[in-house]
Amino acid sequence: MSETRRFLPYTRWPEALAKQYRAKGYWRGEPLTAMLARQCELAPDATAILCGERSFSYRELDAASSRLAGRLARHGLGVGDTALVQLPNVAEFYLVFFALLKAGIAPVNALFSHNRLELASYAEQIRPRLFIGSLAHPLFASGDRHSDLLTAIGAELVLLDGESGELGLTHWLSDLARAEGLAIPVHGPTPADEVAFFQLSGGSTGTPKLIPRTHDDYFYSVRRSNEICELGPHTRYLCALPAPHNFPLSSPGALGVFEAGGAVVLAQDPSPISCFPLIARHKINLCSLVPPAVSLWLQAAESDPSVRSQLESLDLLQVGGAKLAEAVARKITPLLGCRLQQVFGMAEGLVNYTRLDDPDDKVIHTQGRPMSPDDEVRVLDEAGNPVAPGQPGALHTRGPYTFRGYYQSPAHNARVFDAEGFYCSGDLVVQDADGYLTVVGRQKDQINRGGEKIAAEEVENQLLHHPAITHAALVSMPDSAMGEKSCAFIVTTEPGLKPLALRKFLRERGVADFKLPDRFETLDALPMTAVGKIDKQGLRARIAEIIAASQPLTTA
């Protein structure tokens, strides 16, 4: 590792708060890799990961990640470098994640649903020296290493999972380095108070923002989540949501399971057909889902009661990512036979849980309370004054695992942080007298489509590239299954423009499928507010009225 390398910049906590968090034992000066080292001492042969027919013990997970870290170090990568990673729900996601941490390389873990647009945006922000992708993704199905996308990403080293040969990920994870007697340079994780990796913000602006997470703050979030959710070596966790999401990664997620010495079982997707057999086969006792997936599970259990026998081992179902309807929440225990835990968190930090001993009223009606004694929460009105308990207001927060600024985004940070370092999440919440939060809306111009966050401005900007579209506004519309879907209001010079053609246009521009508008409405002009901005509140009301009146959808 070169001595000249510098740590990645990030907005640090004020020293007084940092000292407080260390004194209280929240920040222990341990890298995230310490959880693997600990399990290799306690139970090296215990199962860590189950992926299809493959199984990895803690010893094997540690060894494979160390091999890759060593080979990356030999390539000259290390502290101060960044990586862009895009892998599906496979064991390699965790092997790569720990390898990069061990080498001191800070990754951005893109979702597998992300497309050309998102990958190019992340690459522009972090300028990665390393890209790790998968031939299972349509973008790389041709195996072309000279694509425009890879050129735009600009990484000097590209490793693809599923590719044979010397630049295949499997080769770099293999034992060949030892067999060849290669010398491995000294490498190691970044210090605990430096950037470990970046998380993705759902964001309400056109450019996805990156969230720097340190070992100290993220490790505390994992440990405290474990305490609340009572994880241990007995835990068998089904990772059914995309592995890079904050929820299945650390709340308590896979990292919580590794810290506790349990096993992570990977599912390709959260559908009942994928998950129910895995729950039965591996005696899964913990799973986390977003509300649309919960609805699918409930439908499956209701339509065919015999499938419930596959769920006998399931003890706790966590639900988060979007608001869970009370009617749905009440069905979970009777139909799925497990307990419900509501989770309301954000990649930026603050995580709220209903507790395992909470009364039904709290579990059904709220999204939990902050997990740390030092999570500071303010619920403020438009004038910045605290509201009374039970009244809605904007959520502001700071604490030992809530970040202090997006990566290299000073202008945006000035808008979302106040002078005391409180982060305005954009959520509208009600806090009761016991500190429990209920989400009632959002300030940000963001659509939460079943747990997937869509920045309206991003899609609007892409629509405006179409030669026949002069104005565009993307707003949320109510949907019983997803909670929200998206509706694009457009002004066009081509009256016969079809939704099918517009979705094809957006796909060709690299927009991820989940961001494609679910519906299009054509207007002669977009309504404006008194200050000259598009009246999105009015547009949301308009589409809600249309849906309520059961007018036929614009069809593709």
Image: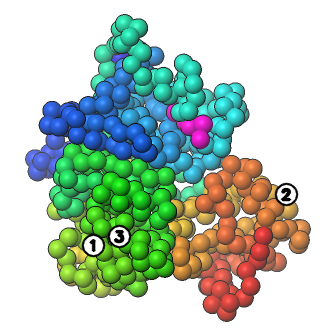
Q: Secondary structure at mark 3?
A: helix
Is residue 429 shown above or below 141? below
Say which residue appears at 35% left-offset and 55% top-offset.
281
Proximity of marks 2 and 1: CB atoms separated by less than 8 Å = no
Which structural element holds mark 2? loop
Residue sticking out furthest to the bottom? 549
Amino acid type at circle 2 is Pro
Counting every numbered tag in the picture gives 3
Mark 2 vs mark 3: which is more N-terminal?
A: 3
Q: Which mark is residue 309?
A: 3
Which residue appears at 45% of the width and 16% of the height? Answer: 75
Residue on which the image places disc 1: 339
Report the residue marked by disc 2.
Answer: 467
- Regarding residue 408, the answer to whether it shows in the image is no
Image coordinates for residue 398, horizontal then vertical, percent: 28, 59
Q: Which residue appears farthest toward the left when viewing the image?
A: 23
Q: CA distance from mark 2 to mark 1?
A: 52 Å
Residue 172 in sight: yes
CA–CA distance in space, label 1 to label 3: 16 Å
CB under 8 Å between callouts 2 and 3? no
Give percent across and percent down for residue 234.
20, 53
Q: Quadrant of residue 319?
A: bottom left
Image quarter where the N terminus lies is top left
